[in-house]
Amino acid sequence: MKKIALAVTLASILSTNVQADALGIYLGGQIWDNQASGTFGDGSSQVDFNLADQTQNSFFIAFEHPVPLIPNIRIASTTLETEGSTTLNTEFEFDGQKFSENTNVNADFNISYVDYTLYYELFDNDLISFDFGLTGRDFDGDVTVSAQASQGSTSGRVSVTEIVPMLYARTNVGLPLTGLNLYAQGNFLSIDDHTLYDYEVGVSYELIDNLAVGVNINAGYRAVKLELEDLNDLYTNIEFDGVFLGTTIHF
């Protein structure tokens, strides 16, 4: 949260030279009911821990302005938390700790990230809009694997603090006279041994739309893929996906 507060303060300072009636501020959040599936581990082996389904939260703030060549700013925060357990059918090593075959192990996956996005509105009208930009995804969190045995407990934990660049795109299609919009947005990366995507598709309804404020209700489907090769010694092939419900406020 400290990173988000600092980034919002910086964005506000950068926007002080823009007239207030020309600056658009967007605030939004969503509740995301997702299913988690996949594996993670070290470089030699990965394990399916039967990760549990969870409800996650996500928030964002964006600043848009009419000044040419200067990009708009979007800052978003997402937390991915889940846990699971399994009985190993082979020896497994994590963070230098060895877990024997037939051992019951528990996993705690707790990774959050803040997206710092600079983007341009390539075109924007009442019927269709398209944004394109670059995101710096700032990962922060840790993954823990533990086991309890008669001879004592064993635990290994890998902390993740890394910034990964990603492409950002968003498109919106308005349905005239309905107050409805269809939209899709996402971040994407496929470079070296990392493959990541984070996209959502949905429908938005204009609940309030006047000169002072706009309020939209959003619903749809979101998916996050984390295929990481040696991100701070963490190797994953995990996907989170499911339906979400959210809101966006525009000043």
Image: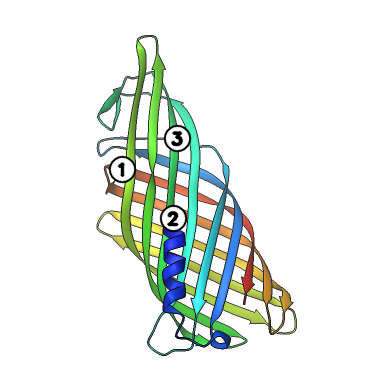
Give the camera-side residue of 92 and 246.
Answer: 246
Q: Nearer the viewer, mark 1 or mark 2?
A: 2
Q: Position of residue 181 (x, y in %)?
A: 65, 75
The amino acid on which the numbered mark 1 sits, given as a three-letter code, is Leu
Determine whether the residue tagged by mark 2 lies in a helix, strand or loop. helix
Give the CA separation, mark 1 to mark 3: 13 Å
Q: Position of residue 231 (x, y in %)?
A: 29, 48
First reached walking from the N terminus: tag 1 or tag 2: 2
Give me the residue at 42% from left, 62% from top.
6
Give me the residue at 42% from left, 54% from top.
113
Residue holding disc 2: 2
- Residue 118: image quadrant is bottom left
> Residue 234 bears which disc, if any?
1
Q: Are marks 1 and 2 in contact (CB under 8 Å)?
A: no
Give me the residue at 49% from left, 84% from top.
65
Label 2 crowd (10 A; few <14 / some 14-19 / many >=20): few
